[in-house]
Image (spheres, helix red, strand yellow):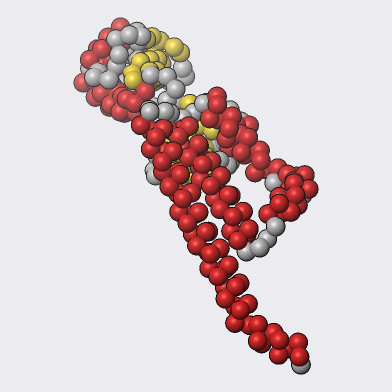
């Protein structure tokens, strides 16, 4: 009873003492979280102002946020009376076990660092990687965000990006449009080639250099196939692709040059009746 009475008498003092610690810990956490966001924005703004690659900007700003937030957590625990030195020692002792448990995350982090250093792709590049295709929107510490042409967000682990083949369609300034155009065996091949050449030369997207190619590539089962290979700017690839197909079809129709489709001839043989 005496112990209980003593605790009751000390309750106001304990509430004030520990209550203030909790309040200060909450304030430290909230302020630190806010400062982490500020650090991210400042690093982002400074690097963007110096025209640093957006890929590096995104990665470094995320690391800045993580470092400030980690310091905030340690300071909050210290305010609550937790021995941070002992905590660090415990974390160090458990580092091996944590590392084994989080080896996937550590692999993603290491892959993220490699992506920033070697830059197989950058923010804004259209890539085919990890079995998906899309425009790189952001490279974070552990993952890469891709936007598909139909505006879906795909988040791929950095390790999956780096472990496979990355096809970067935006790395070069120019791209070649590869079209295969089949014409009828009855068609005038010289006239057909002239029509295709005229279309390529007059198209608004086709570059003069490198030179284009218009040539017969195959004598197929039901058609003579031409390859049409003009060069365009990387950003003009799809507009050029769609426009060339439309212009070629209209021009061949106007020249009465048929574009055959697969067909099969059936020969019916009558068996004489006995």
Q: Position of residue 44 (x, y in %)?
A: 42, 38
Q: Position of residue 22 (x, y in %)?
A: 57, 68
Horizontal side of residue 144 vs 201, given as left or right: right
Figure quadrant of the N terminus: bottom right
Q: Is residue 144 above or below residue 36?
A: above
Q: Can you give x and y, in whole percent of width and height, for residue 98 in the image? A: 73, 48
Q: Is residue 268 visible?
A: no
Q: Which residue: 58% across, 67% down? A: 21
Q: Is residue 246 above or below residue 158?
A: above
Looking at the image, which is closer to me, 58 or 107? 58
Is 253 left, or right, of 47 in this rendering? left
Say left or right for 168 vs 8.
left
Q: Is residue 131 visible?
A: yes
Q: Where is residue 222, by image quadrant?
A: top left
Q: Which residue corresponds to the image point at 47% horizontal and 56% vertical from the top-left? A: 31
x then y, percent, for residue 247 = 25, 23
Q: Residue at x 45, y 34 (%)?
A: 57
- How many circles with numbers are drawn on the protein? 0
Q: Is residue 112 above or below residue 119?
A: below
Quadrant of the image for the C terminus? top right
Q: Which picture quadrant has residue 201?
A: top left
User: Position of 243 compared to 185: left or right?
Assistant: left
* Residue found at x 53% / y 64%: 24
Q: Nearer the viewer, residue 119 or 22?
A: 22
């Amino acid at each position: 009873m005496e112990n209980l009475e003593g605790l009751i008498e000390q309750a106001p003092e304990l509430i004030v003492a520990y209550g203030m610690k909790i309040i200060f810990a909450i304030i430290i956490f909230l302020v630190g979280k806010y400062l982490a966001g500020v650090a991210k924005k400042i690093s982002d703004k400074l690097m963007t102002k110096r025209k640093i690659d957006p890929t590096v900007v995104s990665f470094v700003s995320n690391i800045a946020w993580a470092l400030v937030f980690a310091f905030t957590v340690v300071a909050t625990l210290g305010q609550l009376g937790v021995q941070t030195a002992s905590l660090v020692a415990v974390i160090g002792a458990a580092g091996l076990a944590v590392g084994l448990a989080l080896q996937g995350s550590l692999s993603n982090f290491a892959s993220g660092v490699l992506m920033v250093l070697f830059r197989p792709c950058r923010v804004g590049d259209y890539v085919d990687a990890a079995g998906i295709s899309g425009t790189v929107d952001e490279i974070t510490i552990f993952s890469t965000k891709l936007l598909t042409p139909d505006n879906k967000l795909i988040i791929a682990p950095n390790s999956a990006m780096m472990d496979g083949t990355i096809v970067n369609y935006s790395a070069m300034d120019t791209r070649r449009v590869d079209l295969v155009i089949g014409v009828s065996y009855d068609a005038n091949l010289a006239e057909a080639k002239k029509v295709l050449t005229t279309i390529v030369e007059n198209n608004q997207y086709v570059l003069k250099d490198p030179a284009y190619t218009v040539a017969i590539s195959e004598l197929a089962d039901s058609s003579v196939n031409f390859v049409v290979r003009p060069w365009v700017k990387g950003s003009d690839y799809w507009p050029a692709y769609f426009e060339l197909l439309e212009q070629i079809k209209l021009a061949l129709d106007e020249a009465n040059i048929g574009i055959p489709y697969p067909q099969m001839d059936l020969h019916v043989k009558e068996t004489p009746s006995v």
